[in-house]
Amino acid sequence: MALLDDYEKFVGPEVVYELELYASKLSGVIVKNINSTKVGGGVAEILTRMIPILKELRVNAHWDVIKGDDRFFEVTKKMHNALHGQNMKFTQEEIDIYLDTNERNADQMELNGDILFIHDPQPCALIRRKKKGEQKWIWRCHIDFSNPDPFTWNFLKEYIEQYDLSIFSAPSFARELNIPQVLISPSIDPLSDKNKDLPQETIDSVLERFNIDKKRPIVTQISRFDYLKDPVGVVKVYHRIRKYIDCQLVLAGGGATDDTEGAKVLSEVEEITANDPDIFLLLLPPSSDMEINALQRASTVILQKSLKEGFGLTVAEALWKSKPVIAGAVGGIPLQIAHKYSGLLTHSLDGTAFALKQLLQNPSYAKMLGENGHNHIRKNFLITRHIRDYLLLFLSLLHKKEDIVYL
Ligand code: UDP
């Protein structure tokens, strides 16, 4: 198959053959994905790449996005923060906004198909339209569920438990639920504009466009401007090490349509970075995959100083480019980084500053971490592994045991 064959050079022909074999048992099966944004953030990133591959495999995959007004996305952002551990109280009005918006979307969408694949909390209450019958509903959680606010968790749990199955990204997110839970980690696509190899001229031209000096070290964090990505902490780390080492800081990130807090976080970052010619705050439009790829490839060290993280695709993207990464030891990040082997995990501002100084001063150590990281991503976090996990899951949900092929 045209598109799939191109993955052989990364994973070998057996993996592609295996995908074709599983998919042949699912030919014509309709899988409808529903999330809350077409652009920005990891879920949209994955679906954009995965849907065409599933289609090529003749799985009838679709992707719809729920619609909501600002109030709805303010409520779901609050819910998102609460599920990440912040103590929040919801008014009855907010709960009504959440449920009514889900209800309106259910009226407007065709909730048909063999598998309804619902992503994250925003559209979770669509489950109220589940009918008795063959249709299977999956709830796929992409966020860090290690310590959710109890009220919000109990509210959402009532809906989650109506699904046939739930998927989480890391073992630490497993919760007490009366439905099966499956662990499937996200992935990156080595052939996407975000991750494919780039000629040096393209990388240089992106640096030139943003006036970044390619001769001096570049420290980068790519992320939405979100408190949980701690961009303010990144600037503080930079201020600490800048006294000793000449380097530049790039903070690049656009918004997501379901993230209403971005502007506020950005203005806080602007305040503490004003007038520093070596700090580049880049507000990128949604179609900036090539630019992000180039910035990651041009970087000396990549940071992902998250305070909470479902998985952290940006970590996988950086490691794929063999870059040394320093990241918060939270959520799904430790699945990607074995400390001092495929990157450095940190727990504090001081720790991150120390690690950054160490990597900027020790390029051969930094190189070794990046190379190990690349291999780890190749073996575990490419999109082919992710699709394999999903195909096997669909088979186990839809077919009788005797139809399943064991290799
Ligand atoms: N991203 C992007 N543009 C931006 C910021 C981020 O395309 O301005 C991408 C980033 O490269 C990654 C995804 O969005 O592929 C973010 O996924 P991640 O899991 O790191 O975090 P999330 O935003 O889902 O919390």
Image (cartoon, rainbow, N blue to C red):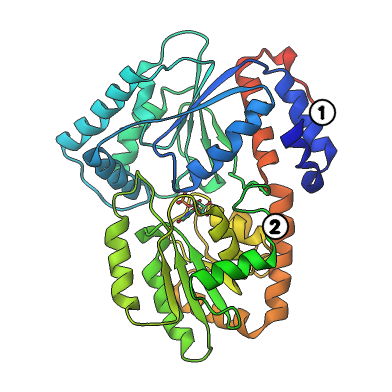
Residue at 58% over, 44% down: 186
Figure quadrant of the C terminus: top right
Residue 178 vs 217, above or below: the answer is above
Residue 185 vs 395, above or below: the answer is below
Left or right, 367 with reference to 73: right
Looking at the rendered structure, the kind of residue marked 1 is: Leu
Dot 1 falls on a residue whose secondary structure is loop
Looking at the rendered structure, the kind of residue marked 2 is: Asp
Task: Please provide percent x and percent y for residue 195.
Answer: 64, 54
Task: Please provide percent x and percent y for residue 72.
Answer: 25, 38
Q: Nearer the viewer, residue 175 or 122?
A: 122
At label 1, counting other C-alpha atoms closer than 10 Å, the crowd grade (few under 14, some 14-19, many 20 or more) is: few
Disc 2: which residue: 197
Q: Mark 2 against mark 1, which lies toward the viewer?
A: 2
Indicate which disc residue 109 carries: none
Residue 28 seen in render: yes
At label 2, counting other C-alpha atoms closer than 10 Å, the crowd grade (few under 14, some 14-19, many 20 or more) is: some
Residue at 41% over, 75% down: 235
Q: Residue furthest right?
A: 13
Task: Please provide percent x and percent y for residue 36.
Answer: 39, 36
Residue 345 seen in render: no
Task: Please provide percent x and percent y for residue 277.
Answer: 41, 82
User: Is disc 1's CB within 8 Å of ligand 1?
Assistant: no
Q: Nearer the viewer, residue 105 or 375?
A: 105
Indicate which disc residue 407 carries: 1
Dot 2 falls on a residue whose secondary structure is loop
